[in-house]
Image: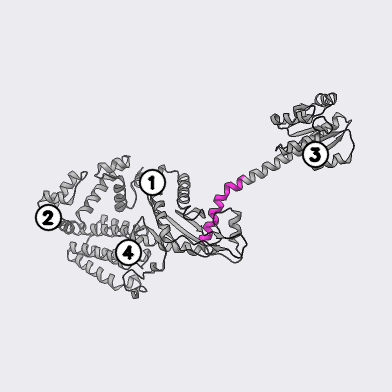
Amino acid sequence: MKLLIAEDEISVREGMVRLIDWESHGIVICGEAGNGSEALSIMESCSPDILLTDIRMPHMDGLELIEQAQSRGFKFRPIILSGYNEFSYAKQAIRLGASDFILKPCRPEEILRTVLEAKKAAEFQEARESRLKERDQSWNRNIPLMKSQVLSQWTRYPAVPLEDRGRLMLELQMDIQNAGVQVGLIRVDTSQIPLDERDVVLLRYAAVNIVKETLDNVYGGRIEVFQEGNDLLWVASMAERGRRGSANTSLITAPSQERLEPQIRMLQGNLEKYLKMTVSIALGSWKASINQAHDSYQESVQAMESRFYQGRGGVFFYSEKLRGEDSGYDNSTESTSILDNERFDLCEMEMLDYLRHGSFEQALDQLDAWLEMFKTQSHYSKQEVNLRATTFMISLQRIAKEHRIGAFEWKNQLVNSMEQLPQVETLEELATIVKKIMQHLVEACSSNRILHRTVQSVLELIKEKYNTNLTLEAVAREAYISNTYLSSLFKQELGVNFLDYLHQYRIEKAKELLQQNLKIYAVARLVGYQEERHFSSTFKKWTGVTPSQYKSSVH
């Protein structure tokens, strides 16, 4: 503790300095002054914790010194020394926060006792302020986490009776207001950052900041962003016009879909540019208050269902039309279970008949029609579509038994494909799985017969030149046949078109190279892809995982 002594009587001042062993009591004399002006000047350099000052001094008395020092922002505990036992001085000293009032003449031990009491009080105050500061810092550090937990609760569950969300918004210093609310949902489609190199915490923090900064303007700063599982969510609100408590308060018009969509597209671009991730985004409709955040969130989840049919990288706004009013199919079928849908039954029966009779090309064409049928009846949920696909794959198993196909590889492929179905996120992914299992079935059915000579030569050509810019046109020219005939021949003999076969062959080669721990961009070039992004999306399509995820799993 630093002590400053201000006393105009030199003998008294020197006695206080020399007759008391201040250092043994943890006190350092940081300055001595003969008047208030001199003491105030010393304060600029030493900033004492305790000021021991006489009242009557030339130029500036002790009480004026205390007032001047306090007005300049100095924090200290004043102790008054005076030979004038007057109540008016004591009153003013108390008003100025004096720790004590000592009358002269006084003994050194009395001065020491008074200063030590002031020191003890100062230490207690300092410890209390330190605890309060630590508590405030802890509170401020935890506010983001508490915000996320509270907002997660509000979006997942409806408000309960007597719940005061508006008060909690103020306590947690949220940027949103209890005046209109909209919930947005961001789902990561793909990420080019390898999982084993990602600092998840920093990536999450960066993504939250990008979302907030990109959408801050369109929502006027009234937005909170947080993580919910693997998704990112935001809650935005409308601002209030008028003063708080005013009966004339009105709402600013919520940003329209036309105004929001360009900002959402910009957000997609920013996330891809800075974090190398592509995302799909869905928004619920505006609700009257924060108590209905759960309803807006449920709408955003329903809007995100459109991603299954429309593919990744979309922006989906909730509307009543999501129920299929304008999708071009007969609404009377909407209440029909997907397992009782006669159109699917007829299409699948024809497909199975083609397979039984070895008409593989027609079966694969019918498969394309079957997959397209899902798009025209998009009122079915992803789970319902998966259920229909599962029952169809069981039917394929019956065809395999009829052809006496008992190969372990076929059965293994079927099991693996059926296990993948619950994880598919888009109809395109489901189509890839079903096409692949159909391809394996056709290969198994054709295993006992010799492939067409032209197909054999094309397979040799793919084996030699898969890592070049190989196209259907170039291969057809070398085989002296038309593009159409080659494509049809491939389907009939191998159960897959030329391009899909080429991609699958390249992916199998890529797996071998990834096991050697080569860089992903290098592997892409080595197997014939000039763009890493094209390679990654193709790899994910045929394997269900990204190259980086596959690489991590094998290492």
Using residue 461 as the reference point, say whether residue 371 is left or right of it: right
Q: Is residue 195 above or below residue 435?
A: above
In terms of secondary structure, where does tag 3 sit? loop
Q: 386 or 381: which is nearer to us?
A: 381
Of labels 1 and 4, earlier in sequence is 1
Q: Which residue is mark 3?
A: 99
Q: Main secondary structure of the magenta part?
A: helix
Q: Which residue is mark 2?
A: 482
Circle 4 or circle 3, nearest the eye? 3
Q: Amino acid at mark 4?
A: Thr
Residue 469 lies, in percent from the top left, at 20, 45
Tag nearer the camera, 1 or 2: 1
Q: Is residue 536 visible from the viewing direction of this image?
A: yes
Check whether the beta carbons of the residues at disc 2 and disc 4 lie within 8 A of each other: no
The residues tagged by marks 1 and 3 sit, at their Cα atoms, a distance apart of 62 Å
Residue 273 is tagged as 1
The residue pinned by badge 4 equals 390
Q: Quadrant of the N terminus?
A: top right
Q: How far is mark 4 from mark 3, CA to CA?
A: 84 Å
What is the span of residues highlighted in magenta in the rendered image?
137-158
Coloring scheme of the render?
one colour
Distance from label 1 to label 4 (Cα)? 38 Å
